[in-house]
Image (tube, rainbow, N blue to C red):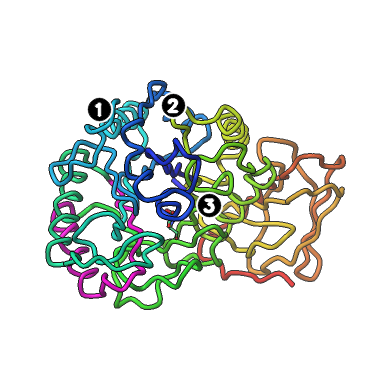
Amino acid sequence: MKFGMFVHWGPVSLKGTEIGWSRGREVPIDEYDNLYKNFNPTKFNADEWIKTLKDAGMKYFVITTRHHDSFSIWPTEFSDYDITATPYKKDVLMEMKKACDKYGIVFGTYYSICDWKHPDYPLGSPGGKTKKETGDMEKFIPFIKGQTKELIEKYNTKILWFDGEWEKPWTHEMGLDFYDYLKGLDENILINNRVDKGRKGMEGITISNEFAGDFATPEQRVGTYDIENPWESCITICNQWAWKPNDKMKSLEECLFTLIKTVGGGGNLLFNVGPMPDGRIEPRQVERLKEMGDWLDKYGEAIYDTKGGPFKPNEQLASTRKGNSIYLHLLNFNQNNFEIQFPENIKIKNCSVLNGEILNFEITDKLLRIDFPAEQKELVTVVKIECDKNVENLQSIDLK
Ligand code: FHN
């Protein structure tokens, strides 16, 4: 699927400050914990969200069901601090789930392990920096097991995207036990590596396979090239995870280059939006996502269901491959010829701009030269190189 939508949303969007972290920092705890009384997203329309996702060329969805601030966006048996306590009351999570099913989008759920408000979780706001006398993980773990069981059995989530595992109260033993418990409920569910303690910070890789998790989670960066171990970079379209008025939004070039370098490195991109308190995704973000979708309508063959490489990404290019084809993604390329070292045991049958003109090429001493009839003006020039055999297991090449 390669490309998904991440959504950070809750009563905090009424303040425009960061979800979880602004509790007891920019926003006094008492004020933060009472925002739900005014959370009434009357313009929320799950169909529109998922249409925006689909028009962006995204294939899956991951929504914050409960973040570090403890607010649950679905009617849960295990807490009164949920959507039913708000003036809006309706089960927005079920509406999202149904819209995903309607549009053939895979439905996933983010769930925070740490909870700075819940009395049974030992640490509190700001940022987990305070202790709660009432903290008792023996009581807290049944709470998170109960809620995640609801997300699996009532909402049939296909991805459990955990977070907040870095704090001391959560241990490796708890992570292994929780992973087995969840796979026991649904053996096909995908669980990220933040269920356990093996994540190497924002780099996101799993330090060794003694730790649980089905995929690695680099954050706010394109992950390191790896076509063996599954990984997914989570990155914001603006700066903040939750909505912030006039937050700086990434340009189309930055959005596309981030997607292409991620996929060219063997990873997925989970691209985040923070909807507004009235329930809408900002029109400018919807537009930017549509522009990405327009590009994928034309060049999706070089992204979906591909493998990264063989040429490792750099500032000039990234590459992907599928079957006998290699796709070169030339970034801001405006020359009329391009040279690259090429594996000698592969014969090239045809070279073309993807869905475009045939290109002349020649190979001399392992150097492939491609000639472009006219100067290229696209943000990304995608060249399809059709070879005489399968190239998916070709050795990866680090371009000098
Ligand atoms: O604290 C969270 C943050 O709010 C956001 O949810 C990101 C998403 O990956 N994860 C944590 C920061 O590492």
Q: Secondary structure at mark 3?
A: strand
User: Label 3: few (<14), some or many (≥20) within 10 Å?
Assistant: many
Sequence-wise, the earlier of marks 1 and 2 is: 1
Along the line of sight, which residue is nearer the eye, 113 or 197?
A: 113
Q: Position of residue 241 (x, y in %)?
A: 49, 47
The three-letter amino acid code for the residue at tag 3 is Ile
Relative to the observer, which residue lies in front, 156 or 195?
195
Q: Position of residue 329 (x, y in %)?
A: 68, 51
Looking at numbered disc 1 in the image, what kind of residue is underneath it?
A: Lys
Q: Which residue is mark 1?
A: 89
Q: Nearer the viewer, mark 3 or mark 2?
A: 2
Looking at the picture, does residue 264 appear above or below residue 312? above
* Residue at (19, 46) in percent of width and height: 152
The amino acid beneath tag 2 is: Asp
Q: Quadrant of the N terminus?
A: top left
Residue 392 position within the rendered picture, expressed as x and y whole percent measured from the top left: 51, 60
Q: Nearer the viewer, mark 1 or mark 3?
A: 1
* Disc 2 Cβ-to-ligand 1 distance below 8 Å: no
The residue labelled by disc 2 is: 278
**Could you tell whether 47 is left or right of 2 in the image?**
left
Which residue, given by chain and number where applicable, does mark 3 sit on?
A: 235
| Rendering quadrant holding ligand 1 | bottom left
In magenta segment, residue 182: yes
Q: Is mark 1 within 8 Å of ligand 1?
A: no
Query: Which portion, as a residue range, is magenta?
Result: 158-186
Point 53% across, 48% down: residue: 240
Quadrant of the frame with the C terminus: bottom right
Measure how far apart labels 1 and 3 are at the Cα level.
30 Å
- Is 335 drawn above or below residue 373 in the view shown? below
